[in-house]
Image (cartoon, rainbow, N blue to C red):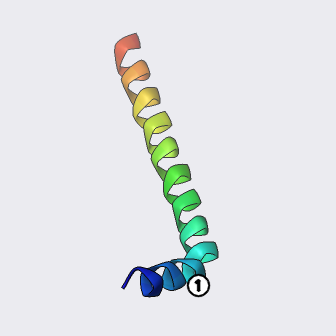
């Protein structure tokens, strides 16, 4: 079981890496956007 899962993980590493990077980019972008909206709301 462990050997199978490790083989699967190795097969999916580039894909998984890229999706992980996309997710972190999206979440950081969302955090930036929410920070901006909070900041602009605080200005009024």
Quadrant of the rendering where the C terminus is positioned: top left
Quick check: 40 above or below 13?
above
Q: Is residue 7 above or below residue 39?
A: below
Asked if residue 41 shows in the view, the reply is yes
The quarter of the picture where the N terminus appears is bottom left
Residue at 54% from the left image edge and 71% from the top image edge? 16
Q: Please provide percent x and percent y for residue 2.
A: 40, 79
- Secondary structure under the numbered disc 1 in the rendered image: helix
Q: Residue at x 52, y 51 (%)?
A: 24
Q: Is residue 44 visible?
A: no
Closer-to-camera residue (14/7): 7
Which residue: 56% across, 80% down?
12
Q: State the image coordinates of residue 26 (x, y, percent, origin top left).
A: 50, 53
Q: Residues within 10 Å of mark 1 (few under 14, many from 20)?
A: few
Residue 4 quadrant:
bottom left
Check disc 1 and report the residue beneath it. Answer: 11
């Amino acid at each position: 079981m462990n050997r199978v899962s490790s083989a699967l993980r190795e097969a999916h590493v580039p894909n998984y890496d890229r999706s992980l990077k996309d997710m972190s980019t999206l979440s950081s972008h969302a955090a930036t956007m929410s920070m901006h909206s909070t900041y602009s709301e605080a200005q009024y």
